[in-house]
Amino acid sequence: MFAQTSLRRRLIALAAASLMFAVLVPVTPAVAATEACPSSIPSAGYKDLAGYSAETIEAVNCITYYGISEGVTAALFDPAGEVPRWQMALFLVRTAEDLGIAIPVSTDQGFNDLGTVSTAARSAINQLAQLGITKGVTATSFAPYEPVPRWQMALFLTRLYTKAGFTLPSGSAQGFVDTADLPLATWQAINQMAQLGVSKGTTPGHFGPNGFVYRWQMALFLARQLQACRAKPLTVSISPSVTSSPTSESVLLTVLVREADGSVVSGRYVDFFVGSLDTSKKCVLDTDASLAGGDAGTGTNCKIDSNDPKTNSIGVATVALTHANVQEIDTVYAWVGATGQEFDADEVTSYSTVQIQWTLPVGKLVVADKTAKYGTQVQVGAELRTSTDQAVPLAGQKVVFKVSRDSVQIITQSVNTGSNGVATLIYTGPADPTTGNDPTEVDTVVAFWDKDGDGVDDGAAEFDDTATVTWDDAEPRADSFSLTQSSVSGPTGAQLTLSMKVVDKFGVGYPNARVTFVVSGANGTTLVDDTDSSGTAQVAYTPTVSGIDTIDARIDFDRDGTIDAEDFDYGDVPDQSHYVVQTAPNLTDGIHTFDLLGVSASANAIDVVEIGTGNLYRLLYDTSNDLFSVDNDGKLIDAFETALLKLTLPALDGAGGVELRTNTYTTTVSGSSTFILETS
């Protein structure tokens, strides 16, 4: 299974080292898609860009895609908003990461006016100072809330360009008539940005150096800066050798890094880690996992560093993943970034994930013996288990089945296990030799877990197991049945369902057998139904008289109306009793004792037989009733019902054991009745 690569975030690939220090000649700013911001970059979905140029909208989409900037909300970019210096610090640090610049760990650079900015902004400001991209407005002040003027932006971007390893152009005059009074370094920076195509000026001949930078302008500057630095978005894909594995095995993880045009990227560090992300999108490591070929284990860091493997000449990096003896699902992350960069899903521009399911080690492969009817299909399952017979839900494992009959191999077939760790071979048996009672025929089935994929049974190393499939005919008949009712007891007027399940000697439902149900007693009736394809016949009747109904049945397999030797007559089918109860009348004061027939918790009802009289009653209760055990400690209704439902019903002993007692009882359940559950 391949993980999806993030559509929104991609990393940047710098040009080859031989080009890193080349002097760029002046270029014309591109209006159409560029290598850094190709047309494949999706829309960021902002709703407030109407009226802006196509290049501006593409630039906003591009820097959002790279993770340099996000909107002020999910739907708004605020293109006309001014950019404060604290915000520009964040943009520039993220751009630096995308250009492969190693970002130092933030340390205090002496600015004493950062107390109210966010932690992320404070770190970015200090990191820019450490990189030499900003110097502050004074040695101790950064002025984080001041808007960025265009002349400052030129200085920031030229320093960033140099830090990325490129040589700036000459900085010769580019025709701006409003920059003559600026310091030489600033004047040169403005002209260098124009030479690089990063800036065009506000109007022909004017740069507007003292104008503030708006967010739409910032998007253009940074998108063009990416192009000037020859940035390209990368895609990262991760492929595991298997997606589920026992903890006794290792999983090979292969990562491929490509540029947007599909060309491979060699020599890039790839960091792997196993775990999850916290609420701030930082990594949380799973210490049960260990990566060989990546960081030493997964507890070292989530950082691009020299401990990480590099992509080879075909853009591939690999690691082996192992795991402690714990069943769980792991998420593996693979990502590329600038050296020293720590993983943060809000800032990392290219990463991919894959999930690996770990199971307990396999200790055996179990194949069960089967009996089947001549000419039918049989399913033979081979189940992966631990040495202590626990199921191992290991999917996608190759199991080879070899079937022999009369010492001749007739089937060789490989089947992958499902999510339950079971591989199932399905094949059809030999035809029934005659219509009479024939001898059985036995197939021998050998199955083994083909771990090495060579199709050869390596014996105990691949946990081979042997079973038999015995083919038989339907003669002599050995059918079985079960008669059931939908409830043991119920009130008059409540429909009762009767079912008969008939199966043959192979455990398969027997269709088209005629079942006659006979009800005698309080509500005599006769009902007939034929079994369906599953071997089930089902009828229903509605008792109208309180009393005990006796239910019997017979099965006529050939439906000829005659009970032959192969059929089951009434005497062959054990009778069942159904107790038809009536709503209890008002009972006199004193103790009444009952045996319990059935419980209907949903109806707040108990079906009982009164000891001594044999009367069948339905006692109603609700939360107004008082419930007591024999030691007179109060019980809640739900505890009372739970105790009743655990009993084997009907509980008929006629004298003690499990019984109910009640004092004065009225049919209105007014709260005057008290139930006592007697369990001794």
Image: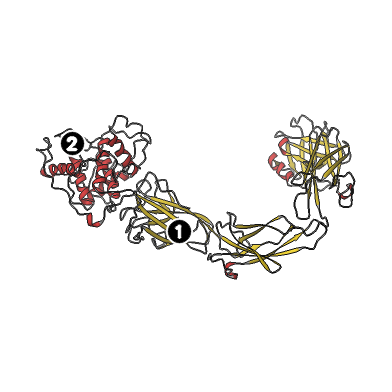
Label 1: state its secondary structure: loop
What residue would you read off at disc 2?
201
Q: Judge from the rendering whether residue 463 lies leftward or rightward of residue 270; answer left or right.
A: right
In this view, the mark in front (1 or 2): 2
Disc marking residue 287: 1
| Three-letter residue code for mark 1 | Thr
Give residue 662's quadrant in the image. top right
Q: Disc 1 and disc 2: Cα gap in Å? A: 54 Å
Query: Can residue 412 be seen from the camera position used here?
Result: yes
Give residue 473's quadrant in the image. bottom right
x then y, percent, for residue 95: 28, 46
x then y, percent, for residue 560: 87, 44
| Three-letter residue code for mark 2 | Gly
Q: Judge from the rendering whether residue 74 lies leftward or rightward of residue 597; answer left or right.
A: left
Estimate how packed mark 2 is, as few (under 14), some (14 to 19) or many (20 or more) residues with alpha carbons within 10 Å. Answer: some
Q: Nearer the viewer, residue 185 or 470?
A: 470
Q: How many marks?
A: 2
Q: Nearer the viewer, residue 361 or 22?
A: 22
Q: Judge from the rendering whether residue 256 lies leftward or rightward of residue 245; answer left or right.
A: left
x then y, percent, for residue 586: 82, 31
What is the image's colouring? Answer: secondary structure
x then y, percent, for residue 171: 13, 45
Sequence-first tag of 1 and 2: 2
